[in-house]
Amino acid sequence: MSNEAIRLLIVYEYALIREGLRALLVCPDFEIVAEVSNTKAAVEEAKRVRPHVVITDAYINKVSTAEMTRAIVNELPDTKVLILTPHTDAKTVNQCLQAGVQGYVYLDVTSTDLARYIRAVARGEAVLDSKITGIVLARVRGEAIEDRPEHRLTPQQMEILRLLAKGASNREIAQALHLSENTIKGYAAEVLHRLGVKNRVEAAMLATSKGWV
């Protein structure tokens, strides 16, 4: 960054939050160039004003801002996105990081720290506050619960998944596990639901890629 002011785009659903951030970010080295209340407008406004940093929530109108982030960083690689949010669940954090956010900060932050985070992000530094760091470390170490099949599926469901991945029919699985075909049909549907996949082919591909079968 040169000595020019850091250009900020504020993207929040509620006017009160936008007004609060405006009041907090009155600094000689900050310039709020625009503010919008939805993700579609944010992408268009970012292209127009070309901010150094976009400050936004993890969700706007109950929709993840991950796609908005991805669109902005793909279109404007020099623009950084800083998430300032109350949402700290692992799924949301991972989703945003994968989309390309430069910083992820819990909403309960002081104005001094927020200003420091914005400057760091503008310099190209990655910023995570202490509440987020543990989630990211777990992800790096492969310890996130949602990545462990044993935390998603019961042993019986894992066995059904293994048989599904081998191409077994409901009848063949029922015979192997000494259960009725209707019972297996219900269990198989629950396996797909827990894994977040649409069909048996996706389940088999996921199981194979994770080394579960």
Image (cartoon, helix red, strand yellow):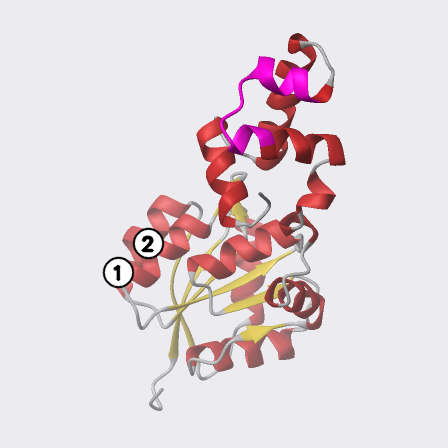
Instruction: Give the extent of the magenta segment.
Output: 163-176
Residue 146, x across and y down, in percent: 65, 48
* Tag 1 residue: 75
Assign a secondary structure to mark 1.
helix
Which dot marks residue 158?
A: none
For residue 71, the mark is: 2
Judged by its main secondary structure, the magenta piece is helix
Q: Nearer the viewer, residue 44 or 176?
A: 176
Residue occupying the point 60% across, 32% down: 161
Q: Height in image: 69 above or below 103? A: above
- For image coordinates 48% across by 80% down, the residue present is 125
| Apparent side of residue 152 relative to residue 168 in the rendered image (left or right) | right
Quarter of the image that includes the N terminus: bottom left
User: Which residue is at a point 39% across and 51% down the rendered structure image?
Assistant: 68
Amino acid beneath label 2: Ala
On the picture, is 198 further left or further right than 2?
Answer: right
Left or right of residue 201: residue 181 = right
Q: Is residue 114 left or right of residue 73?
A: right
Pinpoint residue 205: horizontal percent, then vertical percent. 46, 40
Q: Position of residue 159 (x, y in %)?
A: 67, 33
Q: Is residue 84 above or below residue 191?
A: below
Asked whether residue 164 is drawn in magenta, I would say: yes
Instruction: State the image quarter where residue 213 is shown.
Output: top right
**Given contact means CB atoms under 8 Å apart, are the residues at marks 2 and 1 in contact?**
yes
Residue 141 in magenta stretch: no
Q: Give the image quarter of residue 86.
A: bottom right
Considering the numbered disc 2 on the image, is that residue within a helix, a strand or a loop? helix
Residue 154 % position (x, y): 75, 35
